Structure formats: C-alpha cells, structure tokens
Image (tube, rainbow, N blue to C red):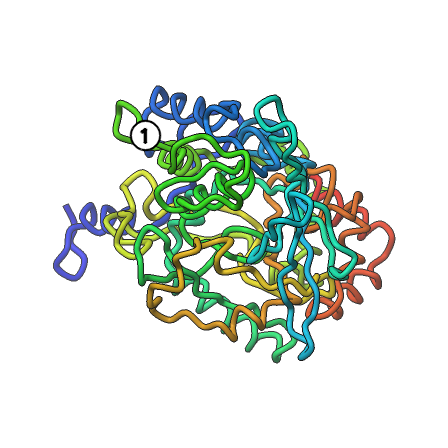
Amino acid sequence: MKLFLGVSVLACAACFCASTPSEAPTGFDNKTNGMVDDATHAVDQGKFDEVEQVSDGLGPLYNAQSCSECHQNPTSGGSSQVSELRVGHRGPHGKFENPEIPIARSTEIIKGRSLVNDRAICPSGAFPGTEIQERVPDSEHIRTFRVSGNILGDGFVEAVPDQTFVDLAKEQCNKSHHKICGQVLYVPIVEAPGQTAVGRFGWKDQQASLLSFSADAYLNEMGITSRLQPDEVTNLCNTVQEPNDQPGADGLSDIDHFARFIRAAEAPARDTQLAATSKAREGEKLFSKVGCNECHVQTLTTAAAGTKLNGGTLTVPAPMANKQFHPYGDFLLHDVGTGDGIVQSMTEHYGKRMYSVTWKGLSIPEFENSANKIRTAPLWGVRLHSRLMHDGASVTLLDAILRHKGEAEHVTEKFEKLKSSEKDALLEFLRSL
C-alpha cells in the first residue's frame, strides 16, 4: 500500500469520500429519504392526508380540511393551485397595517393577521344564529393571493446551515454590483423560545423550522390549535378542548407527524428524459448565461451529521447530512417587482404570546423592509405547476419570466435579447425541472 504524506492512499480516499456530498434522494413515490423507515413515513403521511372534522377542532375559521388539500400535486407534499387571500392597508405614515375584519354582525373584530380565511364552520345546527364568515372591508386596498407551494424536499432545506444563506446573499450582492441582493431574515423558532434562525419557508420566509411551519399552517389554514399555537383566531362556534392537537398513543401530536413527514420526504425529481435532450442542455447553459441562476441557485448542501438546528431542538441525522440537492432557488427575499406590500404579522405566525419573549437577533425593521419582497420561488418541480409566481397570476413559463423586474430587470432584458431558438431552449430546460 502506497503512502502519501504519511497517510495511506485508501485512508485518503476514505477521507475524501466522507467529505464529498452525496446526492439527496428524489422521487414522487411516497418513499422516505432515509431519515425514517417507510412504515413510519406512511404513518406520517396518513396524518398529513387526514381530513379534519369539526369534532377534531377544525375552524372556526379555516381554508382547508387537510394538509394534502393544499399540497397534493402529483402526490402528498407537492404543490397545488389552491391559493389563500391576504389583505391590508397602509397607515398614516405609509407603513403596512393588518386589516380589521368584522365578523358576527360586527360584534367581534379579527385583528393581527393579514390572512382572510375563505371558510367557516357556522352558522350550523348548533349555532344557527352565529355568522362568522370573513369578508374583506373596502378599507383594505392591499390585496393579493398566494398559491400553496411544494414542500417535498424541504427537510433538506431545513438542514442547510444559516451561514450558507448569509454567505450566498453577500456573494450575490458583490457579484452583481448590488443589483441583486437577497435579504436574510431571522425569524423566531416557536419551539425554542428566544431563539431565531434564518427564515426559508413560506413566501415571506416567515419560518425556519418545519415544526413551527406545521403549527402555523395547522392554526391559520385549518383552524386547529396546538401546543405551539394554542390560541384560536375566534372562540365563536368553538366547542373543542384547547389545544385541539393532542398527543397520540406514540406521544406525538399531529404537528410532530407533519414535520417528520416533510423532513423525511424525497426531493422533487426531474424529468430525466427531457433533461437529457440537447435542447434542454443548451437551455441550462443559457439559464446561467443570462443570470437566472443568481437567484435560482442550482445546488445547496446540508450540514454535517450531529449539527444542532432550530435553537438546539433538532439534530441533523446521518441520512440527511452532507447531502447535495438541487432546488434552483436561494430561499432569500427579493424585490422583483411583484411584491404586494404586505408585512407578515408576528402574532399570526408566531402566536399571540410571542411578544412576551425576547427573541435573539429579531429585527422588526428587517421585517418591515420585506414588504415588497417575496422569497425566490424554487424551481424544482416547476413543470408540475399550473400557476406560477407567488400569486399564481402567471400561467406560462414565459409570462413568469417577463414579470421579473426590480432586482431581476437586467436579467429579463438579457433573456429578451436571446434568439427565438435560444428562448425555446431555455424554456425547454425549465420544463425538465
């Protein structure tokens, strides 16, 4: 056995292999990425797919009856055409203010959230005279829809170190001479009071933890309270014990199953047949040449095994560690001319008690600075999306590209200067993702 600088060749090879990232598993087959076994993953998917009833705590205000109702294309955890409504207005000093939504014939006012729920559980047989359906007042001139995004592969996104996003934002800004500067936003980790991390989930990067993300959606999209979000939006028509989400025989609550399901899901797979064509390969080169890859970053890598995340509440397991994946997104906030002016509500996403906690590194001005910014849409699985951009207002890939202004204005201009055949090739590449 030959030696190199006092170390065996085989030992060197072993060290190299240990430090070289391996590819994250992909697919739409409902299999685990290795974090748990397939049987456990199936149980978690069952919870994710479960249709909630009023007796489970559904509502009183809600948008959907299951997680998969909004994340189900082509399988549980994927994207959908389902959208939610958000509104608000600018106050006397020009800053965004959340709406005040009257319900129950104006006897109660819903405050502290920009989300307007589309559905309600009453009037009903039990509450025939209670009217709680939310409607947008004429005073709320800022209005937008946000489509439900893909969450497959988000376990790998969660496992990316914060510093990766910080470095990416700096590199982006320097390389583009300050034309493209992604915003890093530190957000509360609800399960670790006082701790924050770099936001990466949701159109406003409002969550960094998939457990916090799950509790947020369970309350605000389905109206079901949990240990992390124990307060109802309204108590009218409400008859179920709080918090609605109670631990099962295995000691886990629904939000624990949801988070584990997302963490263990495979990343979206490419159309390998289309990706192998010369046209798509040419389009990939053009994608980088015009600068789309500045924000739609091809590859990210997860942290090493044993790394503590989410304020120390999560440890990166070996199957998730040092994995290379390809989201075609930077998970940073950018102003590309499509911002809606909405600033996320602290109480809506982190609970009514969040102001009783001192959060490390939390900056309210940074939140306010994100009003006209949206998280870069990751392009993995984009071929399966019928409605594009954060609001679903673009229905073709070309439409979506041409909407990019603001920080992306110069990139759009480069795209428009391409030959017709080159544009077709770039679009073919996108259709392979």
- The quadrant of the rendering that contains the N terminus is top left
Residue located farthest toward the right when viewing the structure as drawn? 420
Residue located farthest toward the left when viewing the structure as drawn? 6
The residue closer to the viewer here, 40 or 318, is: 40
Percent across and percent down for residue 216 are 47, 46
Q: Amino acid at mark 1?
A: Val
Percent across and percent down for residue 8 are 15, 51
Is any part of residue 103 visible from this angle?
A: yes
| Residue 102 drawn above or below residue 66 | below
- The quadrant of the rendering that contains the C terminus is top right
| Residue 277 drawn above or below residue 412 | above
Q: Which residue is mark 1?
A: 36
Percent across and percent down for residue 79 are 61, 37
The residue closer to the viewer here, 227 or 129, is: 129
The residue closer to the viewer here, 420 or 350, is: 350
8 relative to 427 in the view: left or right: left
Please tell me which residue is depicted at 48% across the width and 66% down the height of the picture: 185
Please tell me which residue is depicted at 65% across the width and 59% down the height of the picture: 99
311 relative to 143 in the view: left or right: left
User: Residue 406 appears in which quarter of the rendering?
Assistant: bottom right
86 relative to 253 in the view: left or right: right
Percent across and percent down for residue 213 are 46, 46
Please tell me which residue is depicted at 61% across the width and 53% down the height of the picture: 109
